[in-house]
Structures are given as structure tokens and as C-alpha cells.
């Protein structure tokens, strides 16, 4: 079931090709924000204009990792700014289909 995992590795969030296709389609940039009260990292495509109105996100490039289409987000600054655990690990996540939002518990 590794293809279903979201992984934190070297301060990068690794997203599988299937997850990227499902949420981002052909978009190569994401809005990312950390919600302290929920202890969640929120990730959505830059096409989600509602997200900008609700949160104050930072824009990140979805970097290609391999030919399968896996991508990563370099979130080191978010981890440091919020004093979060940077240990490499599998992360729990949830997808909100109707808003193309990935909620990652971190």
C-alpha cells in the first residue's frame, strides 16, 4: 500500500503520481499553509482561489521526482517556522474531493 502513502522525507512531502493526478491534474504549483489549531498542513492546487481568501498560503512548486509522476513539496520553512517534527515518516492524510484539498496531520 506504499503507493497510497504521503511521506515526509528530508523536509519534503512526497506525493504519489496517483494522488497528484487526482488532486492537481496538470497544475504544477500548490498553495500550502499550516493550521496550528488543527495541527494540519493544507495543500491545494493554485487554481483554488477560495483557499487564498480563507488562509494566507505560500505558493510552492510541485517538483517532479521520477518518470511515474511522483512529486514533492519542499516544506522546510513551514516545519521550522512552526517548530514541527522533521523526522522522516509516513503521514496521515485526508482528501476533500469537492475542494481538491489535502489535509495532512503533522
Image (cartoon, helix red, strand yellow):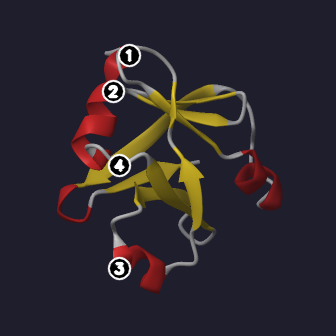
Q: Mark 4 or mark 1: which comes first in sequence?
A: 1
> Looking at the image, which residue is at 27% across and 29% down?
18
Q: Badges 2 and 1: C-beta atoms under 8 Å apart?
A: no
Label 4 or label 1, whichever lies nearer to me, is 4
Query: Disc 2 marks which residue?
Result: 17
Q: CA distance from mark 1 to mark 3?
A: 31 Å
Residue 27: numbered disc: 4
Q: Are marks 4 and 1 in contact (CB under 8 Å)?
A: no
Residue at image point 27% right, 58% down? 100
10 Å crowding of disc 2: few (<14), some (14-19), many (20+): many
Q: Considering depth in this image, is 36 or 81 the residue closer to the camera?
A: 81
Where is residue 32 shown, x and y percent of the image? 54, 59
Nearer the observer, disc 2 or disc 1? 2
- Callout 1: 10 Å neighbours few (<14), some, many (20+)? few
Q: Earlier in the sequence, mark 2 or mark 1?
A: 1
Which of the two labelled residues, at mark 3 and mark 4, occupies the earlier sequence position? 4
Provide the residue designation for mark 3. Answer: 50
- Residue highlighted by disc 1: 2
Viewer-nearest of labels 1 and 3? 3
Amino acid at each position: 500500500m506504499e503507493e497510497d502513502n504521503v511521506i515526509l522525507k528530508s523536509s519534503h512531502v512526497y506525493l504519489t503520481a496517483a494522488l497528484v493526478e487526482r488532486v492537481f491534474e496538470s497544475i504544477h504549483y500548490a498553495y500550502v499553509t499550516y493550521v496550528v489549531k488543527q495541527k494540519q498542513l493544507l495543500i491545494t492546487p493554485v487554481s483554488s482561489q477560495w483557499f487564498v481568501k480563507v488562509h494566507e498560503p505560500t505558493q510552492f512548486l510541485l517538483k517532479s521526482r521520477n518518470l511515474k509522476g511522483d512529486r514533492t513539496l519542499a516544506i522546510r520553512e513551514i516545519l521550522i517556522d512552526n517548530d514541527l517534527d522533521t523526522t522522516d515518516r509516513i503521514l496521515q492524510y485526508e482528501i476533500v474531493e469537492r475542494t481538491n484539498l489535502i489535509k495532512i496531520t503533522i
